Amino acid sequence: MRHHLDSAEENLLIWDIRRNLRIENFPMNEAVLQIHITDAPKKTSNWWFVFNGKERPDVGYLDPSLDVDLYIETNLSSLTKVWLGEGSHTSEAEANSFQLEGSQKLIETFESWFGSSKFASIPKLAIAS
């Protein structure tokens, strides 16, 4: 049971990313994206997004045995920061915790199609001391 609880965070994050990708900005008709979450349990440390047309991609943690067009290596904290708009993939890459490898076209347009959580645009409340 513990393993299931450990993997719940990355499962929810990955599915939220899938649900909110800006498909209309995705620059390729077909592509495979692999996200490797370095600190996740082995079973759920790799996720594949298989894009085919302008539909939402198929997503899963089982290797589809397809060539990967864009590989992202990150930890759960950095992926969460990028997704929630608390950091950019560039700032996390400078901290050596968010690496993009593969198609130059996908890397150059990453911000436009990867998007962010709907919660990213909600202003953070200041906590009075």
Image (cartoon, grey):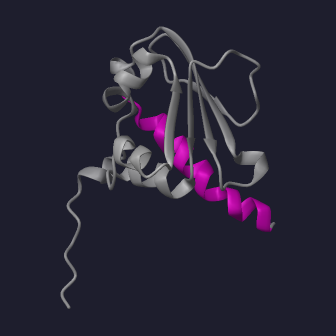
Residue 29 in the image: state x and y as whole percent: 48, 8
Q: Is residue 69 above or below residue 42?
A: above
Classify residue 47 by image quadrant. top right
Magenta residues, dominant SS class: helix
Q: Does the magenta portion include 14?
A: yes
Q: Residue at x 55, y 54 (%)?
A: 76
Judged left or right of residue 62, residue 19 is left
Q: Quadrant of the C terminus?
A: bottom left
Q: Does the magenta portion include 13?
A: yes
Q: Nearer the viewer, residue 88 or 51?
A: 88
Judged left or right of residue 43, residue 95 is left
Q: Nearer the viewer, residue 4 or 46?
A: 46
Residue 66 in the image: state x and y as whole percent: 71, 16
Q: Residue at x 47, y 40 (%)?
A: 17
Count of numbered circles on the image: 0
Q: Is residue 125 above or below residue 75?
A: below
Judged left or right of residue 67, residue 78 is left
Q: Is residue 61 above or below residue 80?
A: above
- Region in magenta: 2-22
Q: Nearer the viewer, residue 54 or 76?
A: 76
